[in-house]
Image (cartoon, coloured by chain):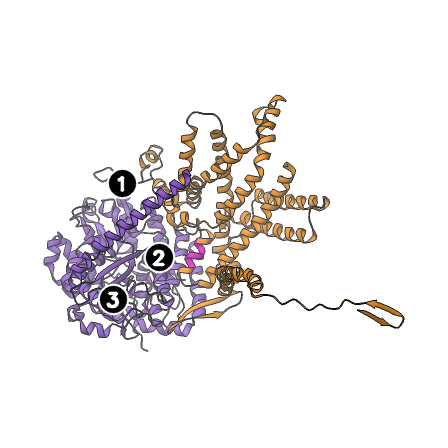
Amino acid sequence: MAVTIGERTATVATPRPRPRRTLAQRIDHATGGFFLWPSILLILAMGIFPFVAAIYLSLTRFELVKGGFKLTWVGLANYRKLVLGSERLHFLGKLVDPEPVGVIAVAAIALGGAWILVRRIRARETTIGGAISYLVALSVAVGIAWVIASTVAPTGRAGTLVVTTLYVVVGITFQYLIGLGLALLCTMKLPGRRFFRIVFLLPMMITPVGVAYMFRMMTDTSKGPLQPIWALAGLSSYSWVNDPWGARTAVMIGDVWQWTPFMFIVLVAALEAQPTDPIEAARVDGASDLDIFRYVTLPSILPVSTSLVLIRMIEAFKIVDLPRVMTNGGPGTATESMTLHAVIIWRALDFGGATAVAFLLVALVTVIATAFVNVARTRVTEAT
Amino acid sequence: MRGTRGIRRLARHVARAAVAVTIAATTVMPVMPAAAQTGPYAGVEINVLTGVGPQIAEPLARRGKEWAERNGAKVNVTTVPFSDIYSKILTDVYTRTNAFDIYVFAPQWMGDYAVGGFLEPLDAHIAQHPEIEWTDIAPFFRDFSATFQGTTYTVPLDGDFHMLYNRSDILTKLNLKSPNTWDDYLVVAKAITDAKLTTEEGKPVYGSCISKKRGAQAYWFVSSIAGSYIQAQGTSQGGFFDVDTFKPLVNNEGFAKALDFYKDSTKFGPPDELNLDVGDTRGLFTAGQCGLSLDWGDIGTLAIDKATSKVIDKTGASILPGSNRVVDRKTGKLVACDKTTCPYADAAGVNHAPFAAFGGWSGAINAGSSAKKKAAAADYLAYVTAPAQSGVDVTIGLTGFNPYRTTHFANMDTWSQAGMSKEAADLYLGAIKSSLNSPNMMLDLRVQNNQYYQQVVLDTIISQFAAGEIGRDEAMQTIFDRWEEKTEELGRDRQLATYRATLGVTK
């Protein structure tokens, strides 16, 4: 159709009438939604709604009243209580001036994090948004490191935040190192390696409560199954669980024992999957075993190691069974993790407080995991 | 193809197994109820929730089986760790899950459940079951433990007082007397420890065994120790809060003395005392490894168990030790006992405040259960508590049930048949009776959310103090602050009114 305005003439397309859809086409069109919506609703119901409801719960106070219960809106009071109020000593611990070594460690984390960020900005490997989120994560990580340094000092006292972080950092470090060592042994052509592969996996198959009871018995120096050995070592009158660091060590040993197999099995697979050509080439070039491990093997398993540590880290932050069964969080609150902290106050109907602890744990995991991924990504990029 | 054959084979196995299970279910299962479905509650299934056994859970299951056989019903006893009972009951009732018909729990939590209307009032049920012999139950348990604001909500199944136990043979051997004060306790505990005694198996004998495990039942012992320093003017004075202001009585010289004792006694205990639950200390005592111990009535009956005890006729019992100095409520300082400050002191001028810790395991009925189940539940509880059954159960250490009826104290034959010598029975029952009859008996805390005050705050802080994480003064101040915070949250006036009502304060 031609339209003339003044001296100009333009051709305008005439809108065609839309063809009427047949019933079959309509059904076809609706099928996608028909199959998709139940899943979306299910996800909303099972995932998003409880999450939103939990956020609401963390901002309220639960109270039993005649005929049922009521939730009273208290705003951020539950969070304030944990960070600044009466639960501060329990959650954060007793903060004192850190020791010089603590200050150096915190400074190293801050400077190291800043150095990585500067390098990534110079290499144009990050966006402005990415840099900001990295800075936020780094600030929180440095803050947590400062809390740790301030509470593990001799006159300080670790709260559940620090104890949990300690379990994660120390536990995963040992799990990875031992797991890697065992995996290297099992990939060598040693007699009986198949048998040991199965044996090394066993701890992971045992329920955590069972592991906790077993370690509780073994650490009992006065009447446990290892009592003769403790007596022989002159430790029959010593109790691991009476001393805060002894109790934490006992819990961490149990955790390392149980989860090293997870590291082991994945690392065995990663080691066996690495190509042999670079190793043979390095050997021809005269590289020693240590050189091959450092410059060939380690970089090739780095991506797997990163994922492995990340998965374990997220899981380890939720530790509750071992301290619950072995020490009930004691002596004092020395072995109490954040999840156990939430459980204990949940039992007293402080649902708001328990949910607030849970959300602070989510924040902690997110920040630490983000920081770890950022650091690991740089290393993996360099390695590959 | 190989895989398909494997799947087919698996399917065949599953089908065979399903057929076998179906045949078994249709042939065997009906036999079981057929024999039982003849009583007045035929086909009724009652679910009971209580703490992990064998104590309490064992007699509930054993008596449940007897009762079920007579009535054609079924009783299932489910147990959860002690620290989870309170929340387990609450989640069951307020989510209307109603998975349980009977809760056997600490009656001091009753207020929280009763306020919500979750418990069945039992006055009518009790009237319908004369076999309960309600007036035979000691007044303290039926009028205080079992009732809330004038209504009866629980049936007492157990009588609870903290007491002092000693190894009479060791005291004789070392020429020592059973301690009458907390200071004496430390002296005796030290003497036993210094004697470096061993059992026949060569295991060491500790001067003192007190359960101090966190998240268990240890926090009651602190109140037992503090009681005689803080409460001297009779039961209505209260030992936890001031009855005029509801200010916590934890920031004074008496509570400080109690904390000092708590820590000092650890020096004479087993190396892992901070991780010992009451079950552990009882085991140590009956194994002959403790010179002194604090406990409910359980050690008394466990000590006569021929199968496990090595201290038969070597166990003495007495009222909790006391103090010859008590707290002046106005100043918070300790003052010497005299007729005015300690009107109920013993002949030696020592104030005792026997602590009715816990109040005795008691059975309540879920208000959300069906009428039929409620009736059956009431009948079952009546059977368990009736003198014929409970009179035997309180003499068995494994049950965890301690005497709470007049007949339990009067009928010496059952104690004799259980293997307790007359001398031991006199000591044991005498200690409970003197606690029960004391005009200065200290009542357990029964205000709303008392579980938070005690099982969360007190338990945690005491544990931190015992572990050396915090000092004495910091511990007292922290308990004070956190109790105050909770009181402000819940409403001081309401908490005060409840507290005064439980103490019988009417002014």
Say what amino acid the circle numbered 1 marks. Answer: Pro
* Dot 3 or dot 2, earlier in sequence: 2
Q: Which disc, if any, is residue B344? A: 3
Which shade of the palette goes to chain A?
orange
| Residue A213 visible | no
Is circle 1 on the same chain as circle 2?
yes
Say what amino acid the circle numbered 3 marks. Answer: Tyr
Q: For numbered disc 2, what is the local secondary structure?
A: helix
- Taking the magenta stretch, the answer to whether it contains residue A342 is yes
Q: For numbered disc 1, what is the local secondary structure?
A: loop
Mark 3 or 2, which is nearer the eye?
2
Near mark 2 (Cα within 10 A), the count class, few <14, some 14-19 or many ≥20, is some
Q: Give the chain of mark 3.
A: B
Mark 1 or 3, which is nearer the eye?
1
Label 2: which residue?
A: B83
Q: Give the chain of mark 1.
A: B
- Taking the magenta stretch, the answer to whether it contains residue A61 is no
Q: Position of residue B157 (x, y in %)?
A: 22, 63
Which shade of the palette goes to chain B?
purple
Label 1: which residue?
A: B204
- For the magenta stretch, what is the residue range? A340-345
Q: Which disc, if any, is residue B362? A: none
* Dot 1 or dot 3, earlier in sequence: 1
